[in-house]
């Protein structure tokens, strides 16, 4: 299994970026994004979970709700994170995560619940 994220970069406050994460080697019920700022713990950003058949539920951290959108393209085994109205506080390394097993909603928010991780992509937002 491999996860490869891309799309990070240096932007100004108010700008947008789209992160992509391609998953190879397996299919995943849950895919998500976490981030880690310097000196801080890794924190949940967003997740998309297959609930039944082709139905999906999306979850967001309060700090990004209304600004970030998570989506997935199963045909491409790719999950996206569209980030709008970026703030300096969004500066972090963003990590893609994937999990095959079924997770209860509260488990989505903790890094320890996720088995597979990508190497991360740096997002820097200047003021």
Image (cartoon, helix red, strand yellow):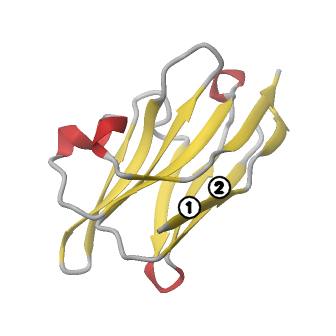
In percent of the image, x 56 and y 61: which residue is there? 80
Q: Quadrant of the C terminus?
A: top right
Judge from the rendering whether residue 95 lies leftward or rightward of residue 43; answer left or right: right
In percent of the image, x 44 and y 80: which residue is there? 74
Asked which secondary structure carries label 1, the reply is strand
Mark 1 sits on what residue?
80
Residue 28 at x, y percent in the picture: 34, 69
Judge from the rendering whether residue 93 lies leftward or rightward of residue 75; answer left or right: right
Residue 81 at x, y percent in the picture: 56, 54
Mark 1, Cα crowd under 10 Å, few <14 / some 14-19 / many 20+, is many
The residues bearing labels 1 and 2 have C-alpha atoms spaced at a distance of 6 Å
Quarter residue 112 falls in: top left
Judge from the rendering whether residue 16 lies leftward or rightward of residue 68; answer left or right: right
Q: Is residue 32 above or below residue 12?
A: below
Q: Is residue 13 visible?
A: no
Q: Is residue 68 visible?
A: yes
Q: Nearer the viewer, residue 37 or 54?
A: 37
Quarter residue 31 falls in: bottom left
Give the residue at the far bottom of this rendering.
Answer: 75
Mark 2, Cα crowd under 10 Å, few <14 / some 14-19 / many 20+, is many
Residue 36 at x, y percent in the picture: 57, 28
Asked which secondary structure carries label 2, the reply is strand
Q: Nearer the viewer, residue 65 or 76?
A: 76
Mark 2 sits on what residue?
19
Kindly check if marks 1 and 2 are in contact, taking CB atoms under 8 A apart as contact.
yes
Q: Nearer the viewer, residue 27 or 65?
A: 27
Q: Is residue 15 above or below residue 5?
A: above
In percent of the image, x 54 and y 16: which residue is there? 40
């Amino acid at each position: 299994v491999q996860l490869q994220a891309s799309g990070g970069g240096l932007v100004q406050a108010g700008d947008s970026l789209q992160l992509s994460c391609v998953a190879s080697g397996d299919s995943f019920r849950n895919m998500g994004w976490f981030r880690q700022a310097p000196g801080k713990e890794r924190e949940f950003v967003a997740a998309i979970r297959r609930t039944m058949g082709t139905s999906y539920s999306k979850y967001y951290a309060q700090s990004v709700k209304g600004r970030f959108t998570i989506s997935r393209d199963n045909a491409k085994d790719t999950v996206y994170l569209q980030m709008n109205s970026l703030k300096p506080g969004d500066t972090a390394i963003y990590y893609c995560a994937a999990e095959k097993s079924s997770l209860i909603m509260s488990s989505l928010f903790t890094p320890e619940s996720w088995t597979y991780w990508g190497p991360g992509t740096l997002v820097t937002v200047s003021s």
